[in-house]
Amino acid sequence: MTQESFASDQPFRPLALGFFIEETNELTDVKPIVQGSDWQQIYAINLLCRQGDFSKTHHVAPILMRNTESLIWSAGVNIIASAGGWEDVQKALSVFQERIDTPWVRYNMSLLLGLSCDLRAVDQLLKIYGRCTDPEEDGDQTLRELSYLLETTGKEIFGGGGEEIEHQRIVNLAAPLRDALFRSVQGTKVFEGETFDVVTLATRLLAAAERENFQSERFYRGRLIFEANTGVNCSSFFNELGRPNRLAAIAILEEFFDGNPQGKYRSGQRYFFGHPIPL
C-alpha cells in the first residue's frame, strides 16, 4: 500500500508514529481542516483534539478511504482510536467495512480496534482474524491487538507472530480472558489484561526501559498510548533507526512521575492530551 506524498506533506509524516511534528507557525493553524491537503486536514484535527474538541474525528475515515498511502492510514487510525470514543471507532469501522476484503484495510481495522483499548473490541478482532489471509500481515497484526488487550506480555495469543494459527484455537484462548476481564475491570477500557490506567501504564514503561532486554514492540505500543493520553512528547523514546532510546525514555517518564500524576488520571478513563475522552 503505497502512494507518493507531495513534498509539502513531508512534515506531517511523523504523525504515523505519534502525535507530534516539528511545528512552525504555518503548521499550527486549524483552517486546513476544510481547505488543506489530506495530511493537513488530519493534523488540523489533531490540533483540535489536543484542545479537547473531538467533534471532527469523524472526518478522518473518509480521508483515509480516498488514500492508499500506508503512513496516512497509520496517522489517521492513530487519531481516531486515540482521541475518539467507542462510538467514533464503530463509525470509522463501518466506513472501512466496504473494503474489509482488502488485507491492508483489515490490518488497519485491527489496529484501530486494538488502539481503542476497549474490551468490546475483542469479539470484532476475532471476527476479523477469521477473515485474515496473510499470517505475516493482517493475521499477525490482529493477534498482536488481541494480545495487547488481553495479555500482560506476549504469551499464548501472540507468541512471536508470523505463524498461521487456526481461528477456533484463538477464540478458545481469547474468550476466557475476555470473560474474566468483563467480570473484573472497571468499565470497558483495558490494556494488557487489566483496567486501563495511565499511571500503571507509565509505571510499566519505566520498568521496561530500565531493563536492557525488553520487547520493543510492546514498548512502542505503550509509548504511543502514553503519549496520546498525557500529551507528553515521546518522540525521543526511539532513535532514527527505530531502536529504543532507554535513557531518554527513563528521563521523560521520571519527569512525568515528578509531576504527581496520580491525582490527574482516573483508572478506567482514557484521555487525549489530558482531556477525558467520552466512553
Image (cartoon, rainbow, N blue to C red):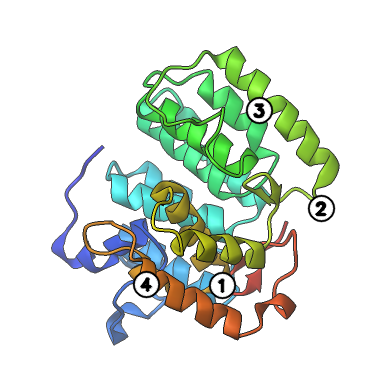
In screen coordinates, is 277 left or right of 204?
A: right
Task: Tell me the SS state at disc 1.
Answer: helix
Residue 22, x across and y down, in percent: 29, 76
Residue type marked 1:
Thr
Q: Position of residue 103 (x, y in %)?
A: 38, 27
Say the numbered circle drawn on residue 174. Answer: 3
Dot placed on the residue nearer the N-terminal end, 1 or 3: 3
Circle 4 or circle 3, nearest the eye: 4
Report helix, strand or loop for mark 4. helix
User: In front here: 105 or 62?
Assistant: 105
Pick the quarter of the image with the C terminus: bottom right
**Residue at the farthest front position:** 212
Q: Residue at x 55, y 79 (%)?
A: 256
Q: Which of the numbered marks, if any, corresponds to residue 230?
A: 1
Residue, disc 2? 186
Circle nearer the viewer, 1 or 3: 3
Q: Where 111 falls versus 124 (above or below)?
A: below
Mark 3 and mark 2 lie on one chain; the one further toward the N terminus is 3
Between marks 4 and 1, how big is the CA–CA gap? 20 Å
Q: Residue at x 33, y 52 (%)?
A: 72
Q: Is residue 32 visible?
A: no
The numbered disc on residue 119 is none
Which residue corresponds to the image point at 46% horizontal and 66% vertical from the top-left? 45
